[in-house]
Amino acid sequence: MTVSEPDVDRILAGVPHLQRGPGGAVGVVKDGKVVGKRAWGYADTTQRIPMTTQTHFPICSISKQMVCLVMQSLLQKPAALMLERKEDPAEQFEAELRRLLPNLKEQSDLKVADLYNMQSGIRDYWAM
């Protein structure tokens, strides 16, 4: 199914009405390119600073859950490119981890499940 840019814009225009709160931002990425984005409300309600698509959010650890959700979804239902490789999806992730983290020992037994813990070793964000 092909979705046009006007379709994406129309869908994104309805998002603010679905979300409660002072403001927000949403984006749609396809094939590595942003095909739609929308911001609404206020980044700072006290000073009445509008939200923009460039507003930085202190998302802290919420991205960890999103990464785990995507990874678990791909393990259960691999993408077509993953299936074409005829290799276990978990092994594909683990090989990519070793590629992205070359300082790990080659014989590292790092597994996808280890990422669910996502402990950085950096002290508490809010304490910094």
Image: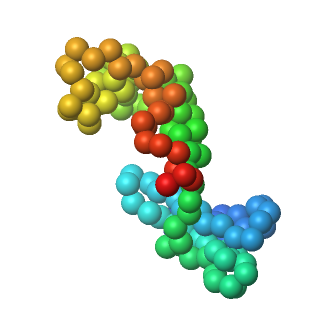
The quadrant where residue 121 appears:
top left
The quadrant where residue 48 appears:
bottom right
Return the x and y of residue 18 as percentages of the image width and height.
Answer: 78, 61
Q: Who's the residue at 57% across and 34% down the image?
A: 69
Return the x and y of residue 19 as percentages of the image width and height.
Answer: 76, 61
Q: Who's the residue at 38% across and 16% down the image?
A: 88
Return the x and y of residue 120 as percentages of the image width and height.
Answer: 43, 37
Horizontal placement of 8 versus 107: left or right?
right
Q: Is residue 6 at all visible to an observer of this figure? A: no
Return the x and y of residue 75 as percentages of the image width and height.
Answer: 49, 23
Q: Who's the residue at 39% across and 19% down the image?
A: 111
Vertically, is 59 above or below 34?
Answer: above
Q: Who's the residue at 33% across and 23% down the image?
A: 94
The quadrant where residue 27 appears:
bottom right
All told, the count of numbered labels is 0
Q: Is residue 121 at all visible to an observer of this figure? A: yes
Coloration of the structure image = rainbow
Horizontal placement of 114 versus 6: left or right?
left
Residue farthest front in this picture: 127
Q: Nearer the viewer, residue 118 or 3?
A: 118
Q: Nearer the viewer, residue 47 or 96?
A: 47
Vertically, is 7 above or below 44?
Answer: above
Q: Nearer the viewer, residue 58 or 17?
A: 58
Vertically, is 1 above or below 108?
Answer: below
